[in-house]
């Protein structure tokens, strides 16, 4: 595979699509994607549809989900369904998995991607906000995993957890969000070890993403970023590919994410200052 820099986003996607199609890796597979009404999740649903997978998507906004389902069917999904609701409610997390069982009798891939709204600013001291965000961004991931594990064990399936550089290193202005993403690393990295010890063939892929040009990111963080975000379509495909290949972790965009992680444990103060200097902090006004 050619390095990203030397290729256009479209060219890069074509290479990955060819890889996945050649092996027909996802045709007929049964996949849940959360947070799939917009952004990276929506793009993942479209890629899975093109590959001929069965998709069940979820988020809060019914009208958007309906549109994504219609598009998935046009693109060639084996089947496409949605359930709408908020992941603050653990019952929804369980219901989505139950729906997959009813629809398909099993599950091959669980893609956990949704996040609740948070601010990008100095920590405002609101503890309740952190509690709520932990429920949406972390506890619902655990609840869905618990419900889905019996089916995933049966199919030898995969769990994909979408995280962030803010789930691996200290980045300013995202304290509540960062806490929820670090929690995902702790829980899923520990669970992965247990699955391996017990010889259970369910893979867990933690996806560490840098800045991606989704509408939400453009609205909330682009004024502080010195470089434009990476394309969401390529990002979505890289996530699916890393799960299909049962990788331990994905770093996307590779250099922007991997290098800070390599520096992290050797020169933490240096990385902290690099991180601060990579942001236009003067554009963040205390609210
Ligand atoms: P978006 O804001 O575009 O998508 C978030 C999704 O979650 C939407 O479908 C939204 O739909 C859904 N959602 C929001 N609140 C809830 C809720 N309470 N219950 C259920 N679903 C909810 O995000 P991105 O595509 O930018 O991000 C996707 C993933 O990638 C996230 O895990 C994020 O942390 C990660 N990431 C993104 C980066 C970026 O720069 N974009 C960088 C690093 C990581 P609805 O509003 O209809 O509910």
Image: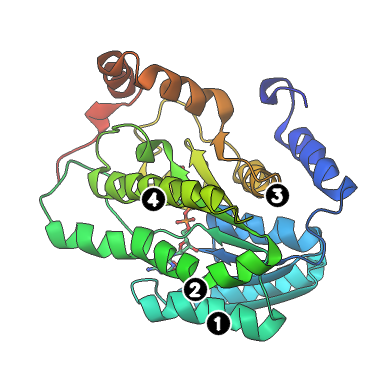
Q: Earlier in the sequence, mark 1 or mark 3?
A: 1
Q: Earlier in the sequence, mark 4 or mark 1?
A: 1
Mark 4–mark 2 distance (CA, rounded to whole Å): 17 Å
Residue ID for mark 2: 147
Residue 219 horizontal/vertical position (percent):
40, 48
> Is 82 on the left or on the right of 15, as rendered?
left
Residue linked to disc 3: 244
Q: Element at badge 3?
A: helix
Tell which circle, 4 or 2, labels the residue nearer the N-terminal end.
Answer: 2
User: Is the residue under label 3 in contact with that under label 1 (CB below 8 Å)?
Assistant: no
Separation (CA) of disc 4 from disc 1: 23 Å
Instruction: Indicate which disc residue 184 carries.
Output: 4
Residue at left offset 69%, top offset 81%: 105
Tell which circle, 2 or 1, labels the residue nearer the N-terminal end.
1
What distance separates the C-alpha of mark 4 from that of mark 3?
Answer: 20 Å
Secondary-structure class at tag 2: helix
Which residue corresponds to mark 1? 98
Mark pair 1, 3: CA separation: 23 Å
38 sits left or right of 45 in the view = left
Q: Residues within 10 Å of mark 2 (few under 14, many from 20)?
A: some
């Amino acid at each position: 595979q050619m390095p990203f820099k030397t290729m256009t986003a479209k060219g890069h996607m074509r290479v990955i699509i060819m890889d996945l199609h050649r092996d027909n890796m996802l045709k007929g597979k049964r996949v849940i994607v959360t947070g799939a009404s917009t952004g990276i999740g929506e793009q993942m649903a479209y890629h899975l549809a093109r590959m001929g997978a069965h998709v069940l998507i979820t988020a809060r906004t019914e009208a958007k989900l309906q549109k994504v389902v219609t598009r998935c069917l046009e693109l060639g999904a084996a089947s496409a369904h949605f359930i709408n609701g908020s992941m603050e409610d653990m019952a929804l997390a369980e219901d989505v998995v139950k729906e997959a069982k009813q629809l398909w009798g099993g599950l091959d891939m669980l893609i956990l991607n949704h996040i609740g709204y948070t601010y990008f600013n100095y920590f405002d001291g609101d503890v309740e906000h952190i509690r709520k965000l932990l429920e949406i961004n972390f506890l619902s991931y655990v609840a869905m995993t618990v419900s889905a594990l019996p089916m995933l064990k049966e199919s030898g399936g995969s769990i994909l957890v979408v995280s962030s550089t803010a789930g691996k290193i200290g980045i300013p202005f995202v304290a509540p969000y960062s806490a929820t993403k670090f929690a995902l690393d702790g829980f899923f990295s520990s669970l992965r070890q247990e699955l391996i010890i017990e010889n259970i063939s369910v893979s867990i892929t933690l996806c560490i993403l840098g800045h991606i040009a989704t509408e939400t990111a453009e609205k909330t963080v682009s004024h502080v970023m010195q470089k434009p975000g990476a394309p969401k379509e390529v990002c979505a495909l890289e996530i699916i590919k890393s799960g299909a290949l049962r990788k331990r972790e994905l770093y996307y965009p590779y250099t922007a994410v991997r290098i800070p992680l390599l520096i992290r444990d050797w020169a933490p103060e240096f990385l902290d200052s690099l991180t601060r200097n990579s942001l236009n902090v003067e554009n963040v006004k205390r609210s």
